[in-house]
Image (cartoon, grey):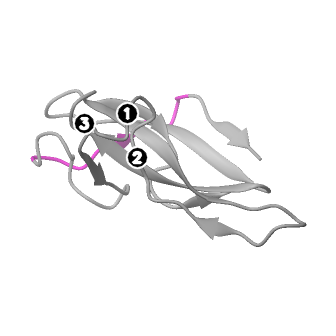
Amino acid sequence: MGMLQDFTCPACGLQGHVSGGEDCGMIAATTTIYCKTCDTLQDATVEKCRVSVPARRIKPRCEKSSLHPIKLWNKNEMCPRCGQSSLALDERGIVTMWD
């Protein structure tokens, strides 16, 4: 089961409700990306898993356009927008479990 959490950069204010890196549910695996064009954190599908069909790896891309430049990001790295600070996990934020 995957989990989404609220992250915020204290330096530039970038926010996202994302996994914060690699994550996996029953039928899909995701990774967190920063889209430079949309200026957003997103979880991109990187693998679709079906019982009857072998899983296949998918190149991560922006949910709005595959032409947008992206950067992989995980919660242990500096902010992908400003590079000045780590994104803080909002302990009081919403946690979403997904499958």
Query: How far is mark 2 from mark 1, CA to CA?
Result: 7 Å
- Which amino acid is tagged 1? Ser
* Horizontal and vertical percent position of residue 48: 68, 58
Residue 79 among those drawn in magenta? no
* Horizontal and vertical percent position of residue 89: 41, 42
Main SS category, magenta section: loop
Q: Which residue is mark 1?
A: 65
Residue 45 vs residue 50: left or right? left
Query: How far is mark 2 from mark 3, CA to CA?
Result: 22 Å
Q: Helix or strand or loop: what does disc 1 sit on?
A: loop
Q: Nearer the viewer, residue 65 or 99?
A: 65
Of mark 2 and mark 3, the one earlier in the sequence is 3
Of mark 3 and mark 1, the one earlier in the sequence is 3
Q: Helix or strand or loop: what does disc 3 sit on?
A: loop
Q: Which residue is mark 3?
A: 9
Q: Helix or strand or loop: what does disc 2 sit on?
A: loop
User: How many neighbours does mark 3 have within 10 angstroms: few (below 14), some (14-19), or many (20 or more)?
Assistant: many
Q: Are marks 2 and 1 in contact (CB under 8 Å)?
A: yes
Q: Which residue is mark 2?
A: 61
- In this picture, which residue range is highlighted in magenta? 84-93
Find residue 76 and report its image quarter: bottom left
| Residue 50 against residue 66 in the figure, above or below | below
